[in-house]
Amino acid sequence: MKSKILKFLLSVLFSVFVSHAMAAPSKQMSTPQFADYSSLGQVYKGKPAPVVLRSQDDRYFRTRLRNSSKEPSNFAGEYSLAIWGCGTSCLMGAAVHLKTGNVIFMPGTISNWQGEGDSLNFQLKSRLLIASGYINEEGKHGRHYYEFTGRTFKHIKTVITPTELN
């Protein structure tokens, strides 16, 4: 009698566990959404600060960065995301903080996207950057999700997608 009750209780507990796991996917399995990464501050509408050219890359791409700083914010509330081509099917860029002029380069070049949608996605009121393809022409082909911290682009996850390049 005790073994039947124990089996029944284990069966019920297992069913509850499985149904809960199926009904509520973990945050790790979910795809990051723009709304989950709201901007660091209000949308900046003031006069942009001069671009601060600290690194060799800053100086090399100074014209693109300065031109971008003259545009209204388009990323994470206070930043202008400057994007330019770096070859066939390749993009690179940097975030220019319109209040301070500081420059933060994206995590690498983005190339060879072979899926639906754009190879780069971002929004004015979100810190989420979605780069699709290869990063620096190597590694995994897919959608790469980054959280912009104001100092760097922190990798959240990569969702691998098939490619015809292999």
Image: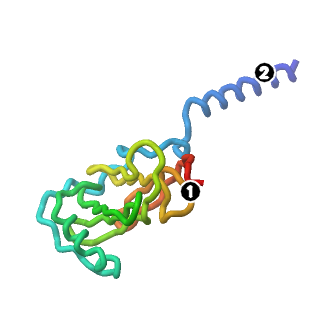
Type of the residue with mark 2: Phe
In the displayed structure image, the side of residue 20 where residue 145 appears, left or right: left
Residue beneath disc 1: 140
Calculate the distance from the C-alpha at mark 2 to the C-alpha at mark 1.
46 Å
Counting from the top left corner in percent of width and height, residue 103 is at 30, 71
Q: Along the line of sight, which residue is nearer the eye, 76 or 166?
A: 166
Type of the residue with mark 1: Lys
Q: Quadrant of the C terminus?
A: bottom right
Residue at 41% x, 62% y is 153
Crowding near the residue tagged with mark 2, few <14, some 14–19, many ≥20 C-alpha atoms within 10 Å:
few
Residue at 37% x, 66% y is 86
Q: Along the line of sight, which residue is nearer the eye, 38 or 47?
A: 47
Residue beneath disc 2: 8
Vertical relation: 23 (above or below) 131 = above
Residue at 32% x, 66% y is 94
Counting from the top left corner in percent of width and height, residue 62 is at 25, 75
Vertical relation: 103 (above or below) 128 = below
Crowding near the residue tagged with mark 1, few <14, some 14–19, many ≥20 C-alpha atoms within 10 Å:
some
